[in-house]
Amino acid sequence: MRHLHESTPTFSDWEGVHDAVANAYFPHALRPRAAGSADLPARTELEVVDLSLVRLAHMRFGGTVEIASEHPGGIAINLQVRGSMESVLGSSRVTTTPGQAATFPADTPARLPSWTPDSVILGLRVDEDYLAREAERVLARKGLALPRVVDLTGPEGRAWVGMARSTLRNARDCGGVLYQDPRVAESVASMLVTGLLLAAVPEEAAASTRPRPVHRVIEAMEADPARPWSPADLAEIAGCSVRRLQQAFREHVGTSPLAYLHDLRLDRVRVDLAAGARPVTDVAMRWGLHHMGRFAADYKRRFGELPSQTAARAA
């Protein structure tokens, strides 16, 4: 984890503000909306914690500005901390107030027409593929689209906000040193995304995508992914036929039970490699992956890098 910007940086002009926010959060176009005193940029506040695939940002602008961004490669979740904010996404216009978060899909033009000085945002930038993997892992759901506005005023939402603020506070107190270990950064990123998903997708909605037999099978596989599960074993846990279980998985999870299990094993291997476990072959076999050529190819497909690259980064 890197603590990119302190909470009270000094900016001399709007170009400097733009460059800092673009580097720390998302590329964008920034336009001041009204002429003001020369010290308005200096009153901009920006604090960002970099967790690789996830970034957490606390932002306030010193003057009224218009922001336009396509959020390339990542999902933006902008929680309104103070003030209110209108956001435009295609023909959709929404206004968020404290406790509500506007969400922005990746690679889609969006505008914030009037970000005023009293408006404070706690933003979460999440890599698009990472969010999809976490949604599959946490909710057993493929193709998740977050609601346009997420209400974070309930118990789960308030817990997530507390978690996010604690992450910022810890980074501030230690300058990010405590979180430079990639294992810690990955753990914190997963915690933030998991908490957000649980707050954004009500339990009844998540449950509706996971019929009870599917849920039981997923729980069993996650509890012991290294076990040499057979289709018959999983069908017995589900209490239905192999064919019916496969149909239910494809309908509600988007893949087969054994394909889900394979990706789950890859996830566990990645966590161990990032934690420094060696050698790669032993780690893979420990989680039930015995075909090394296929393992490396599947790992790269899922994570965008070879297992040896994950291991080297943690060395």
Image (cartoon, rainbow, N blue to C red):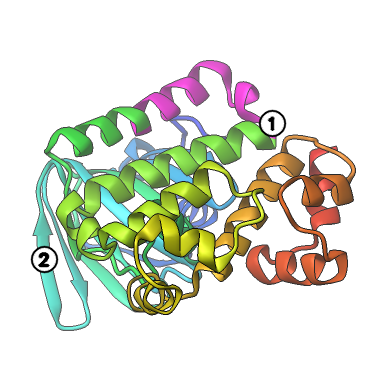
Q: Nearer the viewer, residue 134 or 72?
A: 134
Q: Quadrant of the N terminus?
A: top right
Q: Do the numbered discs 1 and 2 sit on residues whose CB atoms are within 8 Å?
A: no
As drawn, 186 above or below 303: above
As drawn, 212 above or below 145: above
Q: CA distance from mark 1 to mark 2?
A: 39 Å
Q: Which mark is residue 306?
A: none
**Secondary structure under the numbered disc 1 in the rendered image:** loop
State the residue at coordinates (25%, 30%): 159
Q: Is residue 64 visible?
A: no
The amino acid on which the numbered mark 1 sits, given as a three-letter code, is Asp
- Give residue 196's position: percent from left, percent from top: 32, 46
Which comes sooner in the sequence, label 1 or label 2?
2
Q: Which mark is residue 94?
A: 2
Q: Nearer the viewer, residue 137 or 250?
A: 250
State the residue at coordinates (68%, 37%): 182
Taking 69 as reference, is 51 left or right?
right
Residue marked by disc 1: 181
Q: Which residues are magenta?
A: 164-181
Q: Nearer the viewer, residue 177 or 303?
A: 303
The amino acid on which the numbered mark 2 sits, given as a three-letter code, is Val
- Give residue 268's position: percent from left, percent from top: 64, 47
State the residue at coordinates (55%, 54%): 23
Q: How many residues crowd mark 2 within 10 Å: few (<14), some (14–19), many (20+)? A: few
Looking at the image, which residue sits at the far bottom? Answer: 91
